[in-house]
Amino acid sequence: MAMRVAHVAAGVFLACLPVPGGQAFLPAYANAADWAGHPENTWVKQSPREGAPSPRYLYEGSGAWDPLARQFIRWGGHDGIPQGFHLFLWELDSGRWQQKFPNTSPPGACCIDGANVFDVANRRFVRFPGGSLGHGYQWSRKVHLKSSHVWLYDPVGNSWTNMRAPPYKEPPKYSRSVLGSLDAGGAYDANHEVAISFGGQGAAGGMNNLFVYDAYSNRLERLDAANPPSPRDGMGICYDTANDCLVVFGSQYADDEQTWIYRYRTNRWEAHDLKPRPPGKKRKTYSTIPKMAFDSVNGACVCVVWLEEKGGALETWALDVAKLQWTKMNPAVEPEPTGSRARNMGYDSTLNLFFLESVNPKGEARLWTYRYRNARPADRPEPPTELVVVTGAAKATLGWTPSGSPGVQGYNIYRAESDKPWTAEPVKLATTQATSYEDGRLAAGKVYLYTVRAIGQNAQESHDSLKARTQPRVVGTPLVSVLATDKVEVGWPESPAKDVVGYNVYRGLVTVATNTTSKGSWGYTDPEYPEPVVDKVRDITGIEKLNAKPLSATRLVDRRIDLTREGPESADYKYAVYAYIVRAVNRLGAESGPSPYALTIPAEPQNVMLRETDRSAELKWEPSREKGVVGYRVYRVDNRTVTRLTPEPTRQTAFTIDDAGHARYCVAAVDALGQEGQPSSPVWSGQSYQGFFEGPWHQ
């Protein structure tokens, strides 16, 4: 199945010529309407270009190709001594790198190369956990309170959202049933429109856990599959949509030369000992640290392996899953050598191109393109687009934009009853020549998934359209204002869906960990707090719905609460802490998935920025929208030292530092009860990516 995108934009082909040393260069732009002239089986360097340099952001960062905007998204990795939080976009047509300054960001992380993906259906970059280790500049509360299973980045709105998907309970120490935090593998399953995370390292060592995440419903689930591979990290991973399976090969440390395939239907891993296969340095381990992506036009998994014994040289292979056969491609040009953990890979079906982001040994970014094979003439029509479902009492009305292919005879409609898209097995429901359909055979509160296929000549069907469902999309993060110990106001964004009739609000009791001194876990630092502060959310229990019927408004005042009644869940914190979650409800009575939770301690300040002048620096940030916030504290995060610069909260949303030095700075809000909230994302003083952003303000 080809990847489905909303549009096909025009592009330019960059002519490439071989040069001494086996590289490729781009002497000029060709005035072509598309990339049809890109050579087969040749890697072409697209960045840096003349007049469009690349940043030096070092290694171990994550990246994914966004085919909708035709750009590469790059986040995290090393940015000097500590883990990075910086975000870069690379534009295909201009070749320009640009640093972006979003509203907030996940805690800085490294060891995430190959771990994160772009969700085409939901138009979000999916960030799974990475290594938010100490290394001197990590503040315990900033990492722990911002840590989450999943963060989503919206490239259109330039905004991060901490999705805080359940399960909420902190796993036991050394648990192996968790998302891998170091060098896990990530893949996007376009058939079922979900993101996948596999393997990685954690406190318990290597892992072989398999997780699936549905961004539409904010649902994360561990798949307890039979016959799993040995624990590993740094593997190659991709989802083969033609054969509807996950493919895993190689690793960083595991001594395993087999090719692994996983299918939802059997919930079982298959091991295949294939020969020939990509090489690895068999010393103590079969080390390849490969990167993989799937060519949905030609039906091939392309794999780039790293050869340590050849100075980090790269080698290109292709896997035909249907034939269970590896082929060494021997391209005319291979990408330049890289460090061990310095590559991310993606594929764009509309351009029929692979994109490889790499970092050379000097830490400089590179972007490469590769065409496995030219596309054959299409043998089936294009699917319809913009499928929308509007629910009613016991019914749903579907509408879509017609297929753009000529000769379309009509449309086949498929439906599945499931709230888990990866288990859904659609069956044919109806055929119509119209671009709408009413399904009047639905049960109240149930979740149904629909997809539509165009019918071409000779009854040939298109691939699936993007899916639509009778469940509302997850609601945005609530805003919690603590007005008194017995009065909390909760607000939330209104759903844009036409059939949402109201909202259910849930409240749960939070089990917290606290901190009073610089006793943070390995490598983390903290100041000497005058009294205990909330350091971490360990669990949310006793979750109860606060309203009898769905609320038509987007606001609720909770008077059935008493923050002074702290129990063992509060540890030595002076108040009880609660979390609020909101779910939308539609006319069918189906609830959305859980919104990100919001706490009764202040949320992190947004859009913190810094401007340097000589030795000093100015900070500014966005005023909190929480009604109970009365001021802010500013913190300096230096090498193994966190200093509170404002013992008394400042009411201003700006702050000047006389001797800024080489340090990070964060801001935390304080409410009328004296509760200090979650720290903001940091800003760097003494380090910036000049030339890759405009103006003096940066993060």
Image (cartoon, rainbow, N blue to C red):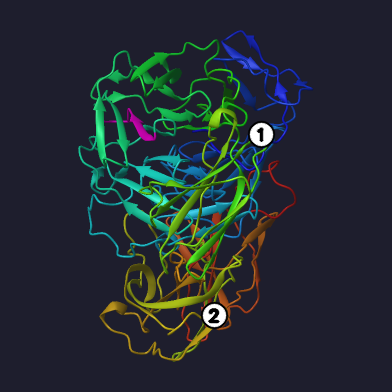
What is the residue that sits farthest to the right in this orientation?
31
| 444 lies left or right of 622 | left
What is the number of the mark on residue 417? none
Residue annotated with mark 1: 405
Residue annotated with mark 2: 648
| Place of residue 467 in the rendered image (x, y in percent of width and height, measured from the top left) | 51, 49
Query: Given the image, on which type of amino acid does mark 2 rest?
Result: Glu
What is the residue that sits farthest to the top in this orientation?
20
- Labels in figure, total: 2
* Front: mark 1 or 2: 1
- Which range is magenta? 244-254
Disc 1 to disc 2, how far (Cα)?
66 Å
Residue 686 in view = no
What is the residue that sits farthest to the left in this orientation?
227
Query: Given the image, on which type of amino acid does mark 1 rest?
Result: Ser
- Decide which of 442, 32 is in the foreground and name it: 442
Q: Quadrant of residue 39?
A: top right
Residue at image coords 57%, 81%: 553
| Place of residue 228 in the rendered image (x, y in percent of width and height, measured from the top left) | 23, 38
The C terminus lies in quadrant: bottom right
Residue at image coords 31%, 19%: 281
Tell me the SS state at disc 1. Answer: loop
**Considering only vertical position in the picture, is 570 above or below 693?**
below
| Place of residue 129 in the rendered image (x, y in percent of width and height, measured from the top left) | 40, 50
Residue 594 in view = yes
